[in-house]
Image: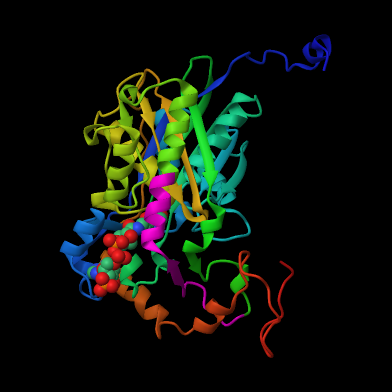
Amino acid sequence: MPQSDAAARAVPGAPSMTYAAITGWGKCMPPSVLSNADLATFLDTDDEWITTRTGIRERRISHVSGISMAHVACARALACAGLEPADVDLVIYGSCSNDEAVPNSASGLQLKLGATNAAAMDVNTACTSFLYGLSTATAMIRTGVVRNAVVVGVELISPFMDWMNRGVAVLFGDGAAAVVLQATEQKEGVLAQKLGCYADARGILRVRGMGTTYANRGVALGDTIWDFDGQEIFKRAVHGMTTASHDVLAKSGYRADEIDLVVPHQANLRIIEFVAKRVGAPMERVFLTVQKYGNMSAATVPVALVEALEQGRVQPGALILTPAFGGGLTWCSHLIRWGKRTTPIGTTEVDLPPPRQTALERIRELIALKEPHGRSNSGLMSAELAEVPQSEPAPGAPSSLAA
Ligand code: UT7
């Protein structure tokens, strides 16, 4: 486009170089704690195995919906930023455990927040959903589509967990956290990022039973089988997080020793240690929550970021790296420049109602609801998957959908 043409079409008053600063942050952790000892009451496992192999000692179990957790986290983030809900232009709901498929979760969150002027979208890249959402919101702010956004990472995994599978049941927890992004002329927010996906490995981390593929096959919603190759996920996770971090450092021109804090996805302490070593960041500069919350999928990085702020681990102007991976197998790393403010402008009274059960009571209830375990087995295993060549349906099998 000729320059004069471009100038004529430029949005009046649009800034020449806009960044997306993080100006608000808030988390919502359900209060009910499920310990390793609790898990050992119904699984053949023990605290020693779980702690040594993963670093996890306990996790939280939610008594409310994902949207309810997201609402509390976002209300706190907005108060922290000193922003009214009506000022929000965009709500992004990062999750792979949505309350409903239609309508989307972001609309439910928009409603609860009273963010009546906002666009509302869900982002699902499994554990990296918050960070892909952060990229999306940052890009929309930097290109002038919106001026501010709320991005939440939220996960309600407990209803979909296969609680009788000790290989996965010990790893996950529920939770939520959000950030507010606002346009600024200061060089803040996401400075560099690398997003990627090892789609050839999408089959190594699959929750069978979530999605329309399983519809009309006699599968009870919530009855799941977790296809999970822990060791392969481990290797791919370390590779993806390291590759993305090296890429981000190379293109931003920063050295590893200039990173003030690494806030990684926290699926397993040993994965984090491998990544930190390969990136060249000492563990003193890595912020950990895995021991008390386990893997909260999309909520993990934002919850850790909020806790790092609460504990004074983020100084004004800090450089933060957030390597992560998730099902798909998606991976990414973001380099974030923090602004001047590391304390909230305001707070809110918005909170969760108290739980009526302990975490263990809730899990026992979920297990009972799923009994007899595996009743949906044939439906869960006969579903057609993108990476598996389609074959003729067996006589009597549900008719297939076009791939
Ligand atoms: O967001 C993505 C989420 N997924 C991940 O992050 C998974 C990444 N991978 C991992 O974190 C690790 O691979 C695991 C923690 C899942 C497993 O650790 P591992 O060191 O790779 O153990 P393994 O799978 O090789 O299993 C070793 C043994 C097996 O027994 P045998 O075959 O040696 O007799 C398992 O059956 O440990 C057994 N085992 C358990 N034992 C006690 C597996 N789970 C448990 C358990 N308690 N919970």
Instruction: Residue at 52%, 73% (x, y): give it.
Output: 221
Confirm whether residue 350 shows in the render.
no
Q: Is residue 16 left or right of residue 188?
A: right
Image coordinates for residue 271, horizontal then vertical, percent: 32, 48
Q: Is residue 3 visible?
A: yes
State which region is magenta: 217-239
Q: From the top left corner, tell me how far across and down residue 346 is, in percent.
A: 37, 28
The quadrant of the rendered image in which ligand 1 is seen is bottom left
Residue farthest to the top, as pictured:
4
Instruction: Give the residue drawn at x 56%, y 61%.
Output: 100
353 vs 223: above or below:
above
Residue occupying image coordinates x 48% and y 66%:
207
- The N terminus sits in image quarter: top right
Task: Please tell me whether residue 331 is drawn above or below residue 201 in the rendered image.
Answer: above
In the rendering, at what x and y percent does residue 268 appear?
30, 52
Please say whether residue 400 is one of the residues in the magenta stretch: no
Q: Is residue 203 left or right of residue 360?
A: right
Find out whether residue 232 is within the magenta segment.
yes
Residue 318, percent from left and from top:
34, 22
